[in-house]
Image (cartoon, grey):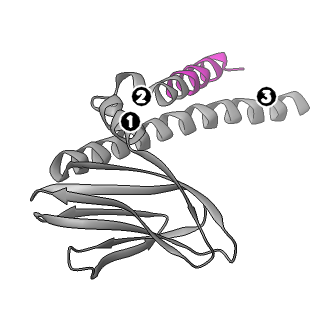
Amino acid sequence: MNFNLLALGTIFLVIGLLLYISLPLYYPGYSTVNNVFKSNQGYVVVGPAQTVIVKNLSAQKGQAIIFLVLKGNANVSLLSSTGHPILDQQKEISIELNQSDYEIQIINLDNQTSNISFTYGLFNAQTISNFYYSLGILQTFLDVVILAGGAMILWYIISWFVTRRK
């Protein structure tokens, strides 16, 4: 039996999992983005098919808003200063803004009163785009490392069963 394959697979799996789990500790800017979302959490009670404005904001050119519904079944709308909808999506919005005033609405999609929790962040559009792009690449790489480790271990186990039967 080739124990090197089992050892290498275990090393890949463990290191990949540890790096994936500890991303918030070492990835640049992760704690900053996380703190922005933590400091901008909110909670609102919305009646059936009711719409509630939860945030008024002023944005500068080059800023982006990320708004997430954490709990509840709701649509999120971004309205211009004149009240015209710019974007309407389920559970989240993410868009680069121009210099203007905006309102964010939550629209309850349930036929009953809902407790809806949300968070949002206003970021430099280029910075947040680069952050999530490079984070996605790193997570994909770590996924491949974890899968490779798991595949090596699985191959070792299958080989062990096949050679044991002979």
Question: Is residue 121 among what the camera can see?
Answer: yes
Instruction: State the CA–CA distance, disc 3 to disc 1.
Output: 45 Å
What residue type is disc 1 on? Asn
Between 115 and 130, the one lying in front of the other is: 115
Assign a secondary structure to mark 3.
Answer: helix
User: Which residue is label 1 attached to?
Assistant: 34
Amino acid found under the numbered disc labelled 2: Pro
The label number, if any, that marks residue 160 in the structure image: 3
Q: Is residue 99 left or right of residue 65?
A: left
Residue 48 versus residue 8 in the image, above or below:
below
Q: Residue furthest bottom?
A: 84
Mark 3 surroundings within 10 Å by alpha-carbon count, few (fewer than 14), some (14 through 19), many (20 or more): few
Compared to residue 149, the image places residue 115 above or below, namely below
Which one is in front in this view, the residue at disc 2 or the one at disc 3? 2
The answer to which of marks 3 and 1 sits earlier in the sequence is: 1
- The structure residue drawn at horizontal position 24% and vertical position 66%, both measured from the top left corner, is 102
Kind of residue at badge 3: Trp
Q: Earlier in the sequence, mark 2 or mark 3?
A: 2
Q: Secondary structure at mark 1?
A: helix
Span of residues in magenta: 1-16
Distance from Cα at disc 2 to Cα at disc 3:
38 Å
Q: What residue did someone put label 2 on?
A: 24
